[in-house]
Amino acid sequence: MREKTAKELRAALKAGETSAAALAECYLAKIAAEDAAYHAYNTINERAAAEAAAVDKRLADGLDSPLAGVPVAIKDNIATETMPTTCSSKILQGFMSPYNATVIEKLAAAGAVLLGKTNMDEFAMGSTTETSCTGVTKNPWDTAKVPGGSSGGSAAAVAAGLAPVALGSDTGGSIRQPCAYCGLTGMKPTYGAVSRYGLLAYGSSLDQIGPIAHTAADCAAVLQVIAGYDEKDSTSAKDVRFDFAAALTGDIAGKKIGLPKNYLGEGLDAEIRAAILAAAEQFAALGAEIEEFEMPMLEYAVPAYYIIASAEASSNLSRYDGIKYGYHPEGFADLEDLYLSARSEGFGPEVKRRIMLGTFALSSGYYDAYYQKALKVRALIRQNFDAAFAKYDAIISPVAPTTAPRLGESLSDPLAMYLSDIYTVAVNLVGIPAISLPCGFDAAGMPIGMQLLGAMWSDDKLIDLAHAYQLHTDWHEKSPARKEAE
Amino acid sequence: MSGYKNTGYEVVIGLEVHVELNTATKIFCNCSTAFGAEPNTHVCPVCSGMPGVLPVLNRKVLEKAVAAGLATNCTITQQCKFDRKNYFYPDLPKAYQTSQLYLPICRNGYVEIEGDDGPKKVRIHQIHMEEDAGKLNHDAKSGSTLIDYNRCGVPLLEIVSEPDMRSAAEVQAYLEKLKSTMEYLNVSDCKMQEGSMRADVNLSVRRVGDPELGTRTETKNMNSFKAIARSIEYEIFRQIEVLEDGGRVQQETRRWDDEKGIGYAMRSKEDAHDYRYFPEPDLAPINISDAYLAEIAAAIPELPDQKKTRYVADYKLSAYDAAQLTRSRYLAELFEQTVVLGGDPKEAANFLIGDCMRLLNAEGREPESLSFSPENLAALLKLVAASTINKTTAKAVFEKIYTENIDPAAYVKANGLEMLSDDSELDSLIADIVAANPKSVADYQGGKKAAAGFLVGQVMKATKGKADAAKVNAKLQEILNKQA
């Protein structure tokens, strides 16, 4: 049987068929029984039962929101007062944030029940969730394979039925790629749509929190709760008024969708190419107009992204110095030794690699050649997308060149791993929204995802395109258990 | 010999001045900026750099920065933004300081000072906004270091001058001009002892006539105008000595120990930080509209130089007196209120610059700490103008106003300090003195005109100083000349 969506859980709660407490208990029991096979969670919320009971009282008093009483899993880079926030890094083991992220406050106000904090690549740096200091997360479709990353824990939790929906974060594809690998629907909202206050920063100008779910409709439900202006985040937009309820029409007749030919060229798995083309045909069958075009500068996105993201990360991660919180080395000779020990012992190799890369790119004498040039590339890529969205309502694209690789295959060749981000990183450089959704399976039975890219602030319209597709396809209804049963 | 104090060398000095803004809250959060609180009581997740926090710019900081720029003739950067300055130190919890490098809020300004060779302009390269760091308290007993984050995020303006100063005196004049300007604008208290005004001195020397600039050093850690002047004198002669001995001045950062009167090298150019500046991604660029600029400009009060010009024109004060009065906004306002209340401008200026500043200096106090009212000063001036009291008495009464803010009219009355106004009483007193001192009268009439002074003194003594000395002198002359 396929997993329940948040929307279905809301309906059951409204009909009095279940309670928030019963749902929390059910998911917690499932996590206790099954998560050992996946390691989706870093921390389980011990207060979940009590919090669910409190939500039931509010439900009885008439609380109504898209997530009222619905359990939610949270990526471990989002600050929570009552559970550790570790970014799956040794340097933050046991760290208790003194405040809640804005999205956590919004979820609480909406009556969502937090199940726990999910595993991730250390500080969101990685594409496989293998750089976590707490151990790898396994793909529920095939536990010999990675769930993707960096939000691999959140994706595995939802795919395995250990949470109906989850929050992830997406700096260069960290929501969309794990969704593609795990047969899920996930969204990177427009930069500034969701408050970053309380998201432990990786690349500040690229990071966005977003939903990981089974359906586009559930993504809408989560965004309805977490999107909106936050006075604590100067980069959050002031007047965002998405109307997700009204946007989910399922009617996409006359929409223009661009299909960038060069995204389907060399380097892309043939099965994925076929799935994308089939999805394009499906959109055409639903009344959309598909047009092939060339999207220039694809090959410059990855280098520009890795320079900017690493530069920002090298600064953002400087505060982890072993003094104020988190990992503190046993002994040290002097201040410099304290810094060296804390950071050498506290950070893993991938984080160190990106800190060094970013530090180099910002160094005196190299700034213009690397960082400044990357900013220019970023501006050019933005112009190209502006031009494309002058013609199209959306662009259809692969998410990753392959389906989920086997555990242990990726980290040995970091450059190849970075290059596999080719389809996702431009979205973050430009700030536009993109939704990743399932569109098939490969011969090995692993999910294939596609993504739809839209203009800035077209999040609700983009979700409607995905919703329309899901009304006429059932890829998103498949689950690992059902696949095995077939 | 020419050059600085006939050394044959010319001195080139530029300053980096940090001014702490007097906003109620910090630059990126709502914590208080109050000085002197218990350690780590004015902190929150934002200013203590907890993971995941974001800054939100305090609009008051922008307002004050723009006012400071307009008052120092700067061009305001209407599209400005913040940058991150990255370095590790325990007093900086984020390990970067949010500051401005690429597009600072103010550029290309100047202030006018009284230079060594007359009025001159000291150009301002830029003024930028930034956050202050915390404070480390080294505990000698336990050998440990404690961190106080209260000062983290207190807003600062860094005012960077061009190398336009040529002596310690010019540096002092520049700093005083900045201080009074910031005070007038209500931008900063500029208290050097509390660290709300700090200066780093970039200094080099070169032989007079040499077109090339010498190698400069930067001296930090000075907390008074006096210390800055002393450190500059020290550094000038140290550099000259190095050069005279055939050596080369090293580019380095130096520290001034004011107690010992010695400067030390802290770190050389090789050890200099690479701050890896880049645009702060957590703060949106700031767009300053023409309307906003006009609004701030309209709210700028009359500044020291403008007041000075007006005092000379309207009150016929000397340029020196006008400059002294306008150094402190508080003193200038006290002066103006006293004049409005009917006090004579010249007399008011004399009391404030002379007696008042002498008393303040003796106690090492600032004009802002004065507690007497302009009403009482004006009343005192009226007593003098009406010849109710003489000048000697007035000085004594002013001291009572200065210390206790007494009502001078009531005080004079209660203590019987009025001058003798009854001429018949004075006439008989003079007659008595003349009769009692025949030798002095004879001396005067014999040509020793100075003998009259003795007789005036005798009369004043008899009246306990309450007579009008000029009047006594006139009456005596009349009697003595008549007798002759």
Image: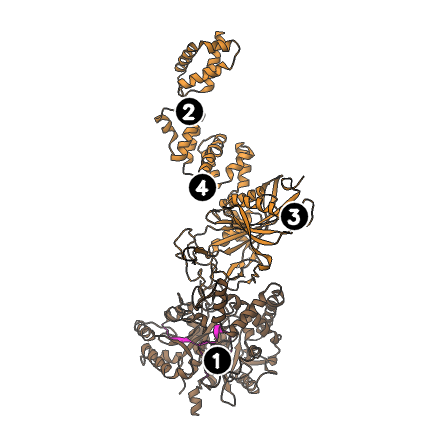
Chain colours: A brown, B orange
The mark that comes first in sequence, 3 or 4, is 3
The residue positioned 52% from the left and 90% from the top of the image is: A443
Spatial CA distance of label 3 from label 4 is 48 Å
Label 2 sits on residue: B389
Using the rendered image, report if marks 4 and 1 lie on a common chain.
Answer: no
Q: Is residue B69 visible?
A: yes
The segment highlighted magenta reads A111-139
**Front in this rendered view, residue A335 or B424:** A335
Name the front one of labels 1 and 3.
3
Can residue B159 be seen at all in this image of the molecule? no
- For label 2, the SS is loop
**Disc 2 versus disc 3: nearer the observer:** 3
Q: CA distance from mark 1 to mark 2?
A: 94 Å
Indicate the amino acid at tag 2: Ile
Q: Earlier in the sequence, mark 2 or mark 3?
A: 3
Residue B245 badge? 3
